[in-house]
Amino acid sequence: MQVYQAKLVSLNEQAIGTAAHGSAVLVVNGDQLVVTIEMFDTPANQQHWEHFHGFPDGRSAAIATMAQDANHDGFVDLPETEPVSGTTMVPFNDQPEAMDIPNDKYPVADANGHFAYTKIVPLAQLSAEFKKAFNDSELDLDKRVIYIHGVAPELDLPATVAGAVGHYDQHVTLPIAVGKIEAVPLA
């Protein structure tokens, strides 16, 4: 068994008016990956996309900070995270092993901005789909970062905020929290 964790800290809190924070624990146990994510102070009553991001070439990803606001519009949008965090890799939705990222099957925060997500993922299927998507890359969890996304649709975003994916606009993809996945030493 191997345990990984990430402390999820807020990103874009000045611009969105709330400091989303939480934690993630990923446990590799035999042929399963158990993912548990709990978030607080997210934008309330809405769905939040959550994924791990990284580099297919095996480089270690880092979390984005306001230093990544390349166009100085006051927001770190999804494309601005890519130089330090890489690409979106695995979704934490209703079926992570399917690697179907743009959909409406992610957790929804309650009226207090809280949500808890737990999923048991078949590791062999996830690894196979991951290798297909990323040229035989390994999951390498300790080289990845987790992002939580999503702000209220009525939030006024400047035209400079990018990150639309299909018919999902920047409100859906704007990062609100991020954390580096780290291996937990087992005693």
Image (tube, rainbow, N blue to C red):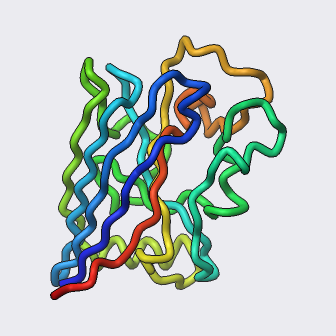
Name the residue rendered at 19%, 52% in the picture: 118
Q: In which quarter of the image is the C terminus?
A: bottom left
Q: Where is residue 83, by image quadrant?
A: bottom right
Name the residue rendered at 53%, 82% in the picture: 137
Please state if 92 lies on the left or on the right of 61 as rendered. Answer: left
Q: Quadrant of the N terminus?
A: bottom left
User: Residue 179: percent from the left, percent from the top?
Assistant: 45, 57
Label count reads 0
Using the image as rendered, state which of residue 69 and residue 122 is in the foreground.
69
Q: Is residue 66 above or below residue 157?
A: below
Q: Where is residue 158, by image quadrant?
A: top right
User: Residue 31: percent from the left, percent from the top?
Assistant: 19, 80
Instruction: Residue at the far right: name it.
Output: 71
Name the residue rendered at 43%, 77% in the picture: 142
User: Residue 49: percent from the left, percent from the top?
Assistant: 43, 41
Q: Is residue 32 above or below residue 173?
A: below
Name the residue rendered at 35%, 30% in the picture: 41
Using the image as rendered, state which of residue 123 and residue 159 is in the foreground.
159
Q: In this view, does 149 lie above or below 67?
A: above
Using the image as rendered, state which of residue 65 and residue 175 is in the foreground.
65
Q: Where is residue 51, by image quadrant?
A: bottom left
User: Residue 39: percent from the left, percent from the top?
Assistant: 30, 41
Please state if 134 lies on the left or on the right of 45 as rendered. Answer: right
